Amino acid sequence: MSEPPLPPIGMLAELTHRCPLQCPYCSNPLELLKANRELDTQSWLDLFSQAADLGVLQVHLSGGEPTLRRDLEQLIAGLSARGVYTNLITAGVGIADGRIEAFAEAGLDHLQLSFQGARPATTERIGNHRGSHEKKLETARRARAAGLPLTINAPIHRHNIEEVPEFIDLALSLDAERLEIANVQYAGWALTNRDQLMPERAAVDRHAEIVAAARERLTGIMNIDFVTPDYFAIYPKPCMGGWARDAFMVTPDGTVLPCHAAQTIPSLSFERFGPRSLAAIWTVSPAFNAFRGTDWMQEPCRNCERREIDWGGCRCQAMAIAGDAAATDPACAKSPIHARMAMLIDEAQRAATVPSKDELFVYRRIGVVTEPA
Amino acid sequence: MALRGRAMVSPQSVPSLPKHVRIQYDPVRQAFAVLSPEKVFWPNDISLDILRRCDGRSTVGHIIAGLAADYDAEQEAVAADVIAFLQEWSDKLLVKL
């Protein structure tokens, strides 16, 4: 590295891998950690304190389902005491009475609630959890009643892309400030289920138009963030805003990663908080420096005018599709293997029309997959 | 369905920061940050000055007069800038009118 890294702004804390839902596109790794591997309360509080010292201003409390941590109120209070902005990312299923109010009381700034479908049947089928839709509606109501601002998160794929207009109405009816129409990213479980999840090209075009029109119509009423489907893209996403540039994430056992899927890059090894300080991991660990900045880039990234816009795109997608974590993200039209993305879309369409044997998806469960696929 | 409507800035508007937005001094970067659900903004001195006056008591007209006096500038020029700024922030739901 030519220059010392800037301090991180954001941190995603995966407090647990436990979850009542089994979404087939979960961003957790295929090898899920059991409860006995989770950091204890004091370790999380120490980590949050070091993060605040280092410059972290926002912490996203996620999982799995973070509300399964009985100490969540304490963790929120710890962050709040340091002035860190807290965002709870929840599936909103099975949260005990009084807890949402307690989170607000502890200083929670914002709540993000996922909906797998805009219709109850879709939500239940995707999360493989009966009654989940009604519970989510109740969580949204309780969050608003507790004065918490609300974002609705809608992960989009083949089986709910036609529900986008209904997602917009749902978010408005729940008094959300923000809606995320987030096309599924094909890493981890979503990569395993890619053929079943990949939407059709015509549906992608239609829903992009619907979202664009709604954004215009709802200016000043509700913000709609759109995570584009990158198999259909021309340019890649600046994954995490650039590798180890201003954000990082932590797994339930305290392993600090530059992004969700970083552990799929076999040449890298990642360190755990505890044995090492967060500052040391952020600044000097080889894994964090591997793709930081632009020095690591090959052509066509190296001389691309967009190199500090896209930061080469997603390293894990380069690994998964190009077989080289330092390659240009194949989502980029300038990638020599960009055409493979279109082939994968077509392959998925063919595979999706073949009737499936028993279950439509490989549902996310602990122990289903023990080796990375 | 849509119970809310788009708010338009007028001299009578009384802007404030919504609950999910806050201004905070960051000792690491030695700058004021505006924290919101997904984004952190780094406003310049003038933007910060406008946002700080969004206290839920002062009207836009009052804010403009105050800024014009403090910066020794023409009210009309200040008014156009302040109204455009607040409309943009209101449209992003970062300022409440």
Image (cartoon, coloured by chain):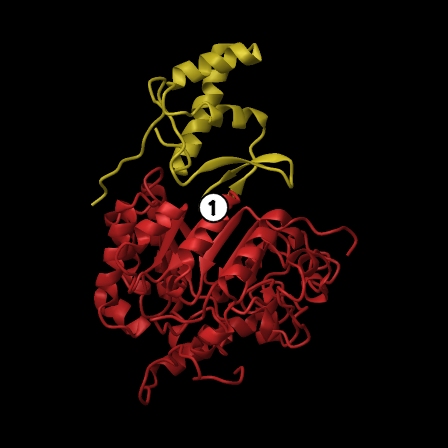
Q: Quadrant of residue A207?
A: bottom left
Q: Is residue A241 left or right of residue A355?
A: right
Outermost residue on the right side: it is: A2
Residue A184, how many percent across, how many down? 43, 66
In this view, A270 is above or below A223: below
Total label count?
1
Residue pointed to by mark 1 = A80
Residue A296, how many percent across, how many down? 73, 63
Q: Tell me which chain appears yellow.
A: B
Q: Secondary structure at mark 1?
A: helix
> The numbered mark 1 sits on a residue in which chain?
A
Q: Please name the color used to draw chain A.
A: red
Q: Is residue B19 left or right of residue A97?
A: right
Q: Is residue A172 left or right of residue A87?
A: left
- Taking depth in this image into account, of A113 and A85 the one nearest to the observer is A85
Outermost residue on the bottom side: it is: A357
Q: Quadrant of residue A164?
A: bottom left
Query: Residue type at mark 1?
Result: Ser
